[in-house]
Amino acid sequence: MIAVAAIRLSDLFAVVMLFGVYSLLTAALFMDLDAVDVAFTEAAVGAGVTTVLMLSSLHLTKRWEVLPRRKPLLSLLVVGITGAALVYAVLDAPLLGDPTAPVHQHVTPRYIEQGAEEVGVPNLVTAVLASYRGYDTFGETVVIFTAGLAVLLLLGIHEDARMRPGVSAIGDQVVLRSVVKPLLPLILLFGLYVQFHGDFGAGGGFQAGVIFATAFVLYDLVFGDGSARSVVPPGWLHRLAALGVLIYGGVGVYSLLAGKAFLDYSALAADPVHGQHLGVLLVELGVGIAVFSVVLLIFYAFSGRSRRR
Amino acid sequence: MIDIIVGHYNYWVVIFLMMAGFYTVIDRGNLIKKIAGLSIFQTSVFLLYISIGYVSDGTTPIIAEGFTRYSNPLPHVLILTAIVVGVSTTALGLALIVRINEAYGTIEEDEIHEQDKSL
């Protein structure tokens, strides 16, 4: 329902706000479907980072949508036909929650039964993410890095002339200031916990990176445009993003040099399970650093751009 | 018949969201609206994967004593990374829109086409 409202409204500001709510609801739904790690990510990314990014691009463009003059009939027809085809396809699909569904038969039983012994990590999501499917995750990290680079190429990081550290665009909000100040160290601490406890509880590099970045985004929003830059200068972030990807790749190359396959962490220590655990920690650290710096870089790129016509 | 309708209700939600997003992408001319539609489409795919990984009476895939049935961790991994990749690609799209606005002074598709024709 919220999705529909978000599509129909032509005030783009309201659209963005509804979108944040929609994201949070999706996160709750993921939680209900036993996917805590995913819910975590969706809540941090969708309700936090995306909303801020969309708001800043609204600030850089226009708030009101011009309604199209053409008739929506053709698009409705295309959508209707596609939807009908999908409904027809779904009739053969397995029921919700059916443990005998084909997805649960192959590969997964091995992850669930032997994951804890082979990788030494109780959180199976982390085990699959970092170890069994380490190649994919490496690819994803590189994609994030590349997207960050592309945003930088398009927008660049500028210093807005009107931007003064310590002066916020929303004015000096005493209440916000005093709420956010004690909250920041807690957010950072929580980020660290999520990063290094991701192998036992829910969490990991992706979530921790986003949480860390959100803390700085919040600081920047409340304590004045550009004040986060004096804490973490953009110049460092370029290097940090590359460092994160390099840590991940470096672990892979190290295991190659040690005579095992690329990203085979059992090469990292004498005891294979111990090596796996170490590998998971290192790789998650690389992911965390890369995600953190890319998200913050993107935020800097958007917030530093002044409105031009 | 009732079984089919109720047992597949996750798919109905997914299809509805997917088509809502699809409609927004092809029908709306505003570029930011298109990005929002694309994101809704994207979440519908996330929801599809996560609901496929769900096992009734199962629990979160973190090994603990007293549980033997866990939901499928593989879709969780795929979607977890896809969400973070999704936000960076959305940011890329928004960056493109910001540049388009600087070059054309508008983010409406029709107006951009008109300006292109008059060149």
Image: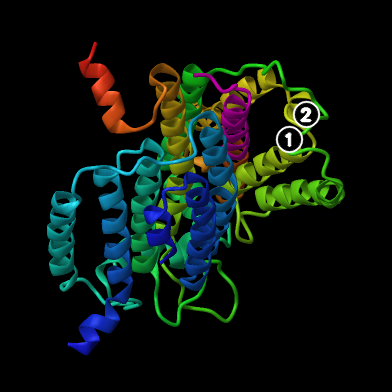
Q: Secondary structure at mark 2?
A: helix
* Residue B12, above or below A128: below
Mark number for residue A220? 1
Q: Secondary structure at mark 1?
A: helix
Can residue A270 be seen in the rendering of this structure?
no
What is the chain identity of the residue bearing mark 2? A
Q: Earlier in the sequence, mark 2 or mark 1?
A: 1
Question: In the image shown, does A217 or B47 lie closer to the viewer?
Answer: A217
Q: Is residue B101 left or right of residue A69?
A: right
Residue at the disc numbered 2? A227
* Residue A251, above or below B16: above
Can residue A51 be seen in the rendering of this structure?
yes
What is the chain identity of the residue bearing mark 1? A
Q: Could you tell me the amino acid type at mark 2?
A: Ser
Q: Give the quarter of the image for residue A102.
A: bottom left
- Residue A1 position within the rendered picture, expressed as x and y whole percent measured from the top left: 40, 67
Q: Which residues are magenta?
A: A287-309
Task: Give the residue displayed 53% in from the left and 29% down from the top.
Answer: A60
Q: Is residue B73 left or right of residue A220?
A: left
